[in-house]
Image: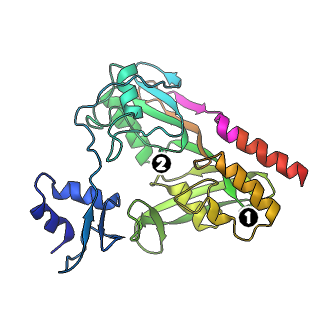
Amino acid sequence: MRLDKYLAGQLAGLTRSQLQQLVAAGEITVNGRPTKASHPVSPGEVIQINIPPKPPSDLVPQEIPLRIVFEDAHLIVIDKPAGLVVHPAYGHADGTLANAVLYHFKEVSKLGGSARPGIVHRLDKDTSGLLVVARDDRTHAALAAQFKEKSTQREYLAVVWGTPAPARGSIESFLTRSSKDRRKVTVSQERGKWAVTHYEVIERFDLHSLLRLRLETGRTHQIRVHLSHRGHPVFGDPAYHGRTSQLSGLNQADTRFVTAVLAQFPRQALHAHTLGFVHPMTGETIFLQSELPADMQALLQELRRYRQAS
């Protein structure tokens, strides 16, 4: 019997769909290892379940500061700080950007459901930058169509380990959930969703480089996975080999420097720098840019200082 079906029969109050979400989030393990909802249950296996706080069905407005870079009667563009979750999910019941949107704006689209008011697309918790929110259902549907049709313009800035060669290129692959850790995504040769990331090196340092990246598709963790797969993970990324695992092979001076910088930079150095789309109601082309946040600017200053001292 499938794991999700077996657990649904054993646990009152949890549907198969909810159990599948827990499996995908890595909250259910079999014999201490992440698994799949389709895993066939065998006698003697040890199943462990961690049930985080369930997201509330009715979102509560919360007074969380938001930096608004564009606003009219139909949509809002927000410069999201790192560390802010976009909408409630298991483990993040409140304190999200969605809670803040409800506090600051009384009218937002309901197409995303009660837990995702106006949310058209997402950014990872520790990725900063531009994100659009719809204020009415018609605008929401039209913006969602632009994202689906890949007609939006999205560019990111990232500090990565090493320097990709060639200095400008594309990374193309299928992406799928990792069988070892369902919270992560991995490159696959033949299954999953097709993903394309275009990159350009815009500044080189001794051990790192600054890239401009353009998304042709928008898959979960796409940039982070693609760069890690190419051997140039995003600096500071704890999930995709962007922290201390890169210290191997460095000399003593480089190790001291990078260790000190990592201690001051707890997230992935990834920022949603530009966002462009056609305004669904006016037909106007909206193109917005967000400056690098203070932590990434400080990181670049440290890398430049070390380059000059070398």
Q: Quadrant of residue 273?
A: top right
Residue labelled with disc 1: 166
The answer to if 30 sits in the magenta stretch is: no
Label 1 vs 2, first from the N-terminus: 2
| 204 shown above or below 125 | below
Q: Amino acid at mark 2?
A: Lys
**Image position of 24 (left or right of 14):** right
Secondary structure category for the residue under label 2: loop
Q: Amino acid at mark 1?
A: Pro
**Image position of 124 (left or right of 108):** right
Q: Residue at x 40, y 22 (%)?
A: 63
In front: label 1 or label 2: 1
Asked if the residue under mark 2 is in contact with the one under mark 1, i.e. CB atoms within 8 Å, the reply is no
Secondary structure category for the residue under label 1: loop
Q: Position of residue 291 (x, y in %)?
A: 65, 33
Quarter of the figure with the N terminus: bottom left
The answer for how far apart the CA atoms under marks 1 and 2 are is: 25 Å
Q: Residue at x 32, y 59 (%)?
A: 27
**Residues rendered magenta in the picture:** 283-297
Q: Report the disc number at residue 150.
A: 2
Quarter of the figure with the C terminus: bottom right
Q: Position of residue 238 (x, y in %)?
A: 55, 57
| 301 shown above or below 216 | above
Colour mapping: rainbow
Q: Residue at x 71, y 62 (%)?
A: 164
Residue placed furthest toward the bottom = 43
Q: Is residue 292 visible?
A: no
Crowding at mark 1 (Cα within 10 Å: few <14, some 14-19, many 20+)? few
**Image position of 149 (left or right of 13):** right
| 45 shown above or below 21 | below
Q: Foreground: 220 or 238?
A: 238
